Image (tube, rainbow, N blue to C red):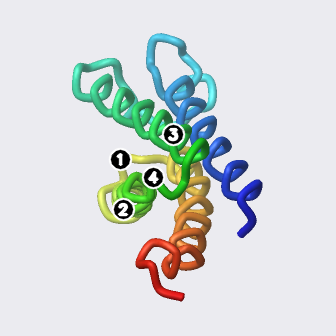
Amino acid sequence: MSPSQQRLLFYSAAIFNWSACLILYAPLGIANALNLSHAVHNGPFEQVAIMAVAIFGLGYWMVARNPEAHRGIVILGLIGKIAVVAILLGHYFLVGDVNINLAALSSGDVIYSVLFFMYLNSTKELSTGAA
């Protein structure tokens, strides 16, 4: 992955996260308009979760500006994106309190998980100092 591709990946990941925040922020009504699920409310826990998603967006923006210095953010982001997918799909398939629209929204996290893994795997040698 070239440096310009790395920058594009992480800038787009930041924008993806910030877009998700706008979509899921209940007072805007976008989630309701898209019939994402009754699981999206305006309580303090949801607001904290949205803030965390926004902060990860800021982290991805930082990675885009200097990938080598912020590799740890990518590792945390990969773990977080896999967890989001697992939670949403678990609630869709097992609990039933998430509709298909909200479960499908996690497909973006699946794509970024794969791309983050590819980035981490392709830059592994650089981070360990191996030749």
Amino acid type of the residue tagged 2 in the rendering? Ile
Dot 1: element: loop
Please give the residue where the numbered disc 2 appears in the rendered image: 79
- The residue positioned 68% from the left and 49% from the top of the image is 7
Mark 3 → mark 2, Cα distance in angstroms: 18 Å
Quarter of the image for residue 76 reads bottom left
Mark 4 → mark 3, Cα distance in angstroms: 9 Å
Amino acid type of the residue tagged 1 in the rendering? Asp
Upstream in sequence: badge 3 or badge 2: 3
Mark whose residue sits in front, 4 or 3: 4
Amino acid type of the residue tagged 3 in the rendering? Met
Location of residue 28 in the rendering, given as x and y in whole percent from the top left corner = 53, 12
Mark 1 → mark 4, Cα distance in angstroms: 40 Å
| Residue 99 versus residue 89 in the image, above or below | above
Please give the residue where the numbered disc 4 appears in the rendered image: 69
Label number found at residue 62: 3
- The residue positioned 51% from the left and 71% from the top of the image is 120
Upstream in sequence: badge 4 or badge 3: 3
Mark 2 → mark 1, Cα distance in angstroms: 23 Å
Mark whose residue sits in front, 2 or 4: 4
Please state which of residues 63 and 25 is positioned toward the viewer in this rendering.
63
Please state which of residues 84 and 103 is positioned toward the viewer in this rendering.
84
